Image (spheres, coloured by chain):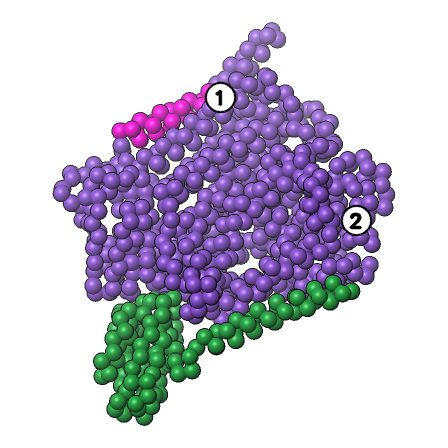
Amino acid sequence: MKTEFLALTLVLLVAVGVPAGVVIYDSAQRPPNEIVLVGQTPLKGNWSQREIRVKQGESVRLRLTSEDVTHGFLVPDLGINAGLISPGQFTTVTFTADRPGTFNFYCNNLCSHEHGAMVGKIVVE
Amino acid sequence: MHSRSAILKISRAHRLVALPLAVLAFAAIWVTVSSATGSGRSTTSPDIQEFVVEARQFSYSPSVIHVAEGQRVRITLRAMDVTHGLALDEFGIQVKAVPGRPDQIEFVADKSGAFPLRCTQTCGVLHPFMAGRLVVSPNVPFQTSLALAVLLTASALCFLWLRRDSSSSLVQGGATHTVWEGTAVAAASNTHGAVRFDLLALRGVSRFLRWRGFQFAMMLPLLVLMVLVVTAGLRGTPVGSHNIAIVFVWLLWWPLLMILLVPLGGRLWCAVCPVPGPGEWLQRRAFIARGPMQLLSLGRRWPAKLRGMWLQNAAFLIIALTSTVVLTTPMATATVLIAFFALALTLALVFPGRVFCRYLCPLGGFIGLCSLAAPLALRVKDEAVCVAHREKECVKGSGAGYGCPWFEYPGTLRRNAYCGLCAECLKTCPKKNIAIGLQPAGHDLVVGSGRLDEAFRTFIALASAALYSAVMLGPWGWLKMLAGNPLAPYFALYAALLLGTSLVVVPGIFLFAAWWSRSLSGTRHMPATRLWQDFSYSLVPLTLAAWIAFSLSLVFTSGHYVLPVLSDPLGHGWNLFGTAGFEGGPVLMGLLPFLQVAALLTGLAWSIGIGWQLARRSFPAPGRALRALVPVALFLLGTTATFLWLFLGGS
């Protein structure tokens, strides 16, 4: 009976513990001020966030990746060009917006017929 | 009069065998000569040969580039839709092209053969299969291996022809088999001694297998992996090459299974697979201990009509149809696994035993078929003991363990096909009459009479190995297009192609071989379909070899993803063990074709050997058996040539 109980505990631990552990570790990996931006072609859902709100003068960390093909990341008005954003690879961009306003960000690497629609905006308040 | 007819008969036999042999010899000479002189296209050899390759999701155009050995080559890569790359691993070069910005590579084609061109930039769902081919002629590896296959077949047949009188031993074991020459041979019915090395003689092994916790101990760590795979499939990145769900399942587990576990251990995986675990634990109301005598299930009987492998064949075809998606999309792999767990659990509560494993699991059917060629086997030591022993705890169960969950009776077990090696009978047998050990590999292929469902299982496995190789490794973009999207209307074409080859073309060609075999052997009263069914077992070793060759390609080309994924299972940028940044490429690609050729030629020789044993079983007269074997051997040779062409490219 003792071994049966131990076995049950182990099975439950695996069934619940593994997914829970993964989720908890995953969220713990993210620094609090980090914004994850995932690129996908517009047909598949476009940028994971089309609008990013940040505060003027605050340092912002953008973590960029892609989930389908190679994209690019460009914010002309803030002078940011993160280069190619490839699936499975992560690029981190840090910036501080010193003036309020709305700045568009674009995918600047041809990614599909709808490439031109891959636009979002950073709103600095 | 009598002697004259005998002479006539022999000369007729000579003619019948001589013709195919002459064809083989001619083919061998032709292939050897053409490989020596080099049948590749002659180039006028300008200083440099230029190619512009356009890359689109998920093919190159042109997808096959022909050059002559020693030629200086320049390839300009143009990305037409999204960012692509092109790697020529054999020559250690690669290039990347962003749309609108072509780039080029230049090299000297100083090695002959066919080399894969591989996309290096994840460019969408089917990116892992985006491939082209560089053929540097003369394609010596392909031509040489083809010549070897022809010579191997010819010399095997010659060898059997010369030895036809000295070999008189019939296949031992198996039930009484009708021999189509008017006589029924009383088959040696006792397989006693078929298992040579009883592993249970080793005390450690014996104690471990007899321990009630054996299965639980094996399942638990694999359950951890499975749960991780499912979690990663549902929550991780959809980029297959960076998600453990794809990398561990299809680039680690599958090749290990095909290259090592199945050829050596047969159904060993079924003994440790965690999929039936939850259902079985519920059914038994115990994990390790022997639970209550009565299993917790509705106790229904599995319908007699559904016994056999037909459901498994259908399930395998469904998975095969969607394989391009399942192999590349983590979510799809996770969904399939969840479906397996759910189905196994549900069925366990309705029917006692392992109904899912035995009758439904698509992989179970596949492994079961290949396990016929494996040396590891569970058998009884002495069938007479079982006959005399009436209690049959191995079927009914006892205080020490459960009745066979696979619905087998060990007392008459002669083939690996449906024994899951769960070791329950080891625990229940009061006579200690069970042995787990090694037998001559392939022994199981020649015992027992042919079954139609198993024959089709072989045809499906063979055809899908060829189609998988063509779709996933070949340079044909249109094929990937057809196979890539199960929701598109043109997918119907791919479905027709897969189902047509598996269920019509391959069985059809083999039926023709069987029909030819019948007329060569001069037994017209014998149904060709019977020969067709019986001889289908001779295809199993070659089928296994083809799957090994295919899986080797997966390991060599994409195995390097295992290290980064180990540290970053979800593709979320973790780095658990510091290996996340490992950027390897394909390794030892030069070795791959040799291993593939070795696997295929071994499979061919082995298959011909099995074919011979099967022929001897149906035709006790060796000359007649040999003539019956010739068309089967030609079919095997043709199959080998097809796979050589798929893996090593044309000339």
Counting other residues with Cα less than 10 Å from the Cα at mark 2, is it few (<14), some (14-19), or many (20 or more)? many
The residue indicated by pointer 1 is B158
Are dots 2 and 1 on a single chain?
A: yes
- The type of residue carrying mark 1 is Cys
In the image shown, does B602 or B401 lie closer to the viewer? Answer: B401
What chain is tagged by disc 1?
B
As measured in the structure, the alpha-carbon distance from the residue carrying label 2 to the one carrying label 1 is 50 Å
Q: Is residue B110 magenta?
A: no
Q: Is residue B110 above or below residue A96?
A: above
Q: Chain of mark 2?
A: B
SS type, badge 1: helix
Please name the residue that numbered disc 2 is placed on.
B428
Point out the stretch of residues depicted in magenta. B17-37
**Residue B282 is at least partly visible in this image:** no
Which of the two residues, B373 or A56, is positioned nearer the viewer here?
A56
Residue at 52%, 49% (x, y): give it: B256
Q: Are marks 2 and 1 in contact (CB under 8 Å)?
A: no
Which chain identifier belongs to the green chain?
A
**Looking at the image, residue B482 lies above or below residue A23:** above
